[in-house]
Image (cartoon, rainbow, N blue to C red):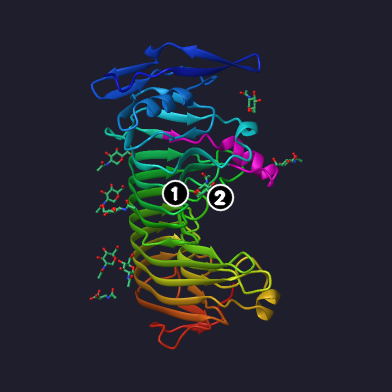
Amino acid sequence: MDKCRALIFAIVAVNGATVTISQPPTQVVKRGSSCTPVAGHSSSIDDAPAIQSAIASCPSGTIVIPKSTTYYINTAFSFVGCSGCTLQIEGTLQATSNTTYWGGRRAIFLMDGINGATVYSATGTGIVDGNGQAAWDLFAANSSYQRPTLFYINNSKNVKLSNLYFKSAPNVFHSVTGGSSNVSYSNISLYAVSSSANVAHNTDGWDIGQSTYVTIDGATVTNDDDCVALKPGCSFATVTNISCTGSHGISVGSLGSGVNSKDTVQNCLISGATMINSAKAAGLKLYPGPPDHGTAVVSNVTFENFILQNTDYAFQVQSCYGEDSSYCETNPSTAQIAGVVVRNFSGTTSTHYSPNIANIDCPAAGTCGLTLSNITVTPPKGSAVIQCANTPSNLGVPCASGASG
Ligand SMILES: *[C@@H]1O[C@H](CO)[C@@H](O)[C@H](O)[C@H]1NC(C)=O
Ligand SMILES: *[C@@H]1O[C@H](CO)[C@@H](O)[C@H](O)[C@H]1NC(C)=O
Ligand SMILES: *[C@@H]1O[C@H](CO)[C@@H](O)[C@H](O)[C@H]1NC(C)=O
Ligand SMILES: *[C@@H]1O[C@H](CO)[C@@H](O)[C@H](O)[C@H]1NC(C)=O
Ligand SMILES: *[C@@H]1O[C@H](CO)[C@@H](O)[C@H](O)[C@H]1NC(C)=O
Ligand SMILES: *[C@@H]1O[C@H](CO)[C@@H](O)[C@H](O)[C@H]1NC(C)=O
Ligand SMILES: *[C@@H]1O[C@H](CO)[C@@H](O)[C@H](O)[C@H]1NC(C)=O
Ligand SMILES: *[C@@H]1O[C@H](CO)[C@@H](O)[C@H](O)[C@H]1NC(C)=O
Ligand SMILES: *[C@@H]1O[C@H](CO)[C@@H](O)[C@H](O)[C@H]1NC(C)=O
């Protein structure tokens, strides 16, 4: 029985109108247990329906995007129907740059409620291109314009992505949330660099929200926001062997933004990171307290084995995130920090805050269970200064007053 026999539809825009053409089943070429959707070979032909139909008709089979072939993703792509499917990308999946279409949409690629999926490249040639330049340019002109996340995993489990190159996300590259579990990313490159004067704003590498057991191992990221952000509800996330260039660093947060919120990040490990030309290597971003914001719990989070090159801060705790100092003086953060460990950071900071290498502003009305050890980071000139405020007596390193933010 031909598992991959599918009725495929292609949607073709003709003179601005959209017509739906029923394609013969030969739109999927089956070889052994794998299926190759036939590409439209034109950016005006949407290949998303053909690939989705192949997944739906091959729920646990392998769908191949062949080498040297571009498939155009002109409409939001869903993995619905996948149940242990494999999407093997050797060619390119390229999203349309149509900002009218993507405006206000959640994601370009969405996995929602999926149990078991693999997306990978065997040869390492697979590319997922978010084609975000037009979106960055439009957002620079109109900050109300809402851009999609490139690859969004929601309420899914047992998902693996490996050996892929993701480029030009219009907004965040990867989000994992909605109670997802067992999601692994290995050997992944992310690259978002604008070719215009408008930078690639908000191109977070990973936003890991409500989830357990998300792992990132072996990643190279060049972007213009957090390299990895551990967001509310993240637990048991592990990030190993990552290199981040030009980013805002590896962050917990932001947390406690909403009125009455109680955001938690716990039991996470970041081990082995090279941070190049970044705003910080690692840090916590905490909103101040009520009435306009909530509170946060950060517990058992370790940042270890970081190497810095020309990065502004090695470590930063912000407990006045998103507000000015007058709000924070009256309504300080009530966040509870426990078991946060920062150890074995080496390399050099940039001239930006030199000779300050860290700025640790702990919650004035909360707790700050934080220790630093083996911090050998040096500023370009003079000897390193760690600035602090409201830090515990057993912080582990000498520090000078004056932290804020
Ligand atoms: C862009 O998307 C809009 C909304 O879906 C659509 O009406 C328009 O035809 C698209 N433009 C092109 C060039 O495909
Ligand atoms: C900005 O973008 C928003 C959301 O897409 C839209 O409603 C609004 O009309 C745009 N404003 C301008 C001046 O184009
Ligand atoms: C990692 O992925 C790249 C492509 O992004 C590929 O060239 C390389 O072979 C992969 N490495 C391993 C160990 O699979
Ligand atoms: C994510 O999953 C939650 C819970 O199942 C659901 O309410 C939400 O609509 C989903 N979001 C997306 C973008 O699929
Ligand atoms: C996650 O993976 C572990 C080990 O492979 C497995 O025991 C567990 O059942 C998985 N969790 C879910 C929610 O599938
Ligand atoms: C670290 O990740 C890079 C990029 O994915 C990879 O080339 C390298 O082999 C990894 N190193 C280790 C020790 O895993
Ligand atoms: C602390 O977090 C680490 C890293 O995820 C985890 O291995 C360990 O089990 C956690 N400890 C507790 C007591 O949960
Ligand atoms: C310190 O971090 C560096 C860089 O990641 C690593 O090579 C080294 O093994 C670490 N040292 C210890 C004692 O863990
Ligand atoms: C600190 O560095 C020393 C010497 O490099 C090493 O023996 C020790 O294990 C390190 N401690 C931590 C907590 O990384």
Name the residue nearer the viewer: 100 or 204.
Answer: 100
Q: Nearer the viewer, mark 2 or mark 1?
A: 1
- Callout 2 crowding tier (Cα within 10 Å): few <14, some 14–19, many ≥20: some
Q: Residues within 10 Å of mark 1 (few under 14, many from 20)?
A: some
Asked whether residue 148 is drawn in magenta, I would say: no
Q: Residue at x 61, y 43 (%)?
A: 198
The amino acid beneath tag 2 is Asn
Ligand 4 under 8 Å from disc 1 Cβ: yes
Taking 353 as reference, is 144 left or right?
right
Q: Which residue is mark 2?
A: 202
The residue pinned by badge 1 equals: 155
Look at the numbered disc 2 and say if its residue's Cβ is closer than 8 Å to ligand 2: no
Q: Position of residue 275 (x, y in %)?
A: 40, 58
Q: Nearer the viewer, residue 278 or 169?
A: 169
Position of 109 with respect to 294 (left or right) is left
Q: Position of residue 279 (x, y in %)?
A: 50, 60
Q: Is residue 86 left or right of residue 361?
A: left
In-front residue for pair 273/213: 213
- Say whether residue 384 is visible: no
Disc tally is: 2
Give the numbered dot on residue 196. none
**Magenta segment: does it hold 140?**
yes
Q: Residue at x 57, y 82 (%)?
A: 364
Secondary element under disc 2, as helix, strand or loop, is loop
Residue 210 in sight from this viewpoint: yes
Type of residue at label 1? Asn
- Residue 324, image quadrant: bottom right
Residue 230 place in picture, x, y as percent: 46, 60
Determine whether 75 is above or below 282 in the image: above
Locate residue 156 relative to residue 327 in the image: left or right. left
- Region rendered in magenta: 128-147
Q: What is the C-alpha distance between the residues marked 2 and 1? A: 23 Å
